[in-house]
Amino acid sequence: MCAAVVLLFTAANTKAQTAFKVPAYEKVKLPNGLTVYLMEQHEIPLISVSAIVPAGAIYDGDKHGLASITAAGLQYGTKSYTKAQLEEQLDFVGADLNTYATKEYAALSAKFAAKDVDKVLPILNEVLTAPAFPATEFEKEQKRVLARLDQAKQSPRQVINAYWDHFIYGNHVYGNSTSGSPATVGKLTAADLQAFYKGNYTPAGSAIAVVGDFKAAAMKQKLTKLFGAWKNAGTSQAVSAAQAIPAPTAAKVLLVNKDDARETTFLIGGRGIKRDNPDFVAIEVVNTLFGARFTSMLNDELRVNTGLTYGARSAFTPFKNSGTFAISTFTATKTTEAAI
């Protein structure tokens, strides 16, 4: 009886400790289709802004790398600021700004002191809604990207994901390489960035989330005034990602030879889950134990117990319409078979 009481108490206590409640937030839909999320957090006088736009690599067409270089180009000047002026304005108030593209979306993230909100928000608005894409800055970025792509060829760990995506998805847009290739990036022009921006950076389907030390009512007014004039000039291409992806019918292997390689880098896996999978959270928890953390079963076996690698992990990469699961690691060429 005593043991039963202890077990029941432990279970109840664990449930109480693991209960999670999302902090209160407000969701607003602007007339132009932009979704705004507001969450007040007054513990620290900071504000974080995140924006998501449906302008990722799946919209590149045959110009792979275009979404990525367009997202980077958002910071290279606007209608009111040159790149140098933009950096000066943000540095002066200690604001952080990052723009990038993923497989499905482009993103902007920023963090700044709450007292500077009226200084920084208009700048973020220009970065997102009125980039200039000056040819001189584009050419500099293009050269940097080409240099990175050339250097990446020397590191299997940097290029294996591009091989993997194309191997899994073939000619479907999920197989597009986010970074592109020297052949595709080398053909891009500033006009390509401007056309991609016009066709894909639209408020409809986009979202902005603001978290931090502010009053929601006042922030709503600021964002409505700034972003309410953002117009829908583009045409959504989301249907391309919704096209059917042929199901695999047999196991297959892709081998990429690098004569001077001292290590073998590999991925083992296949189709995973979509983002709306009802078991998403449970799957993430199980995968954390299996291979998503340093003390996982996978890393323990391959690093600690056998010493075959410095690190091994597993990950689900969910998209809106598909997803993958992969185990990844690297090992000396002579221990490749043992590690696999």
Image: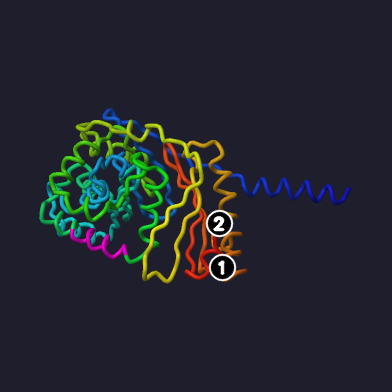
Q: Is residue 310 left or right of residue 69?
A: right
| Residue at (22% x, 46% y) in the render | 122
**Few, some or many C-alpha atoms within 10 Å of disc 1 (few <14, some 14-19, many ≥20)?**
some
| Residue at (16% x, 43% y) in the render | 194
| Residue at (42% x, 50% y) in the render | 42
Disc marking residue 291: 2
In which image quadrant can residue 243 be found?
A: top left
Q: How many marks?
A: 2
Secondary structure mostly seen in magenta is: helix
Element type where label 1 sits in the image: helix
Q: Which residues are magenta?
A: 143-153
Q: Is residue 198 magenta?
A: no
Instruction: Give the image location of residue 102, x and y in percent.
Output: 34, 48
Q: Amino acid at mark 2?
A: Gly
Looking at marks 2 and 1 on the same chain, the residue that comes earlier in the sequence is marked by 2
Q: Which residue is mark 1?
A: 303
Q: Is residue 218 above or below residue 95?
A: above
Of residues 167 and 214, the one drawn nearer to the viewer in this rendering:
167
Q: Is residue 236 left or right of residue 170?
A: left
Q: Amino acid at mark 1?
A: Arg
Q: How is the image coloured?
A: rainbow
Of residues 160 and 57, the one drawn nearer to the viewer in this rendering:
160
Instruction: Give the image location of residue 196, x and y in percent.
Output: 20, 41
Of residues 293 and 339, the one drawn nearer to the viewer in this rendering:
339
| Residue at (59% x, 55% y) in the render | 290
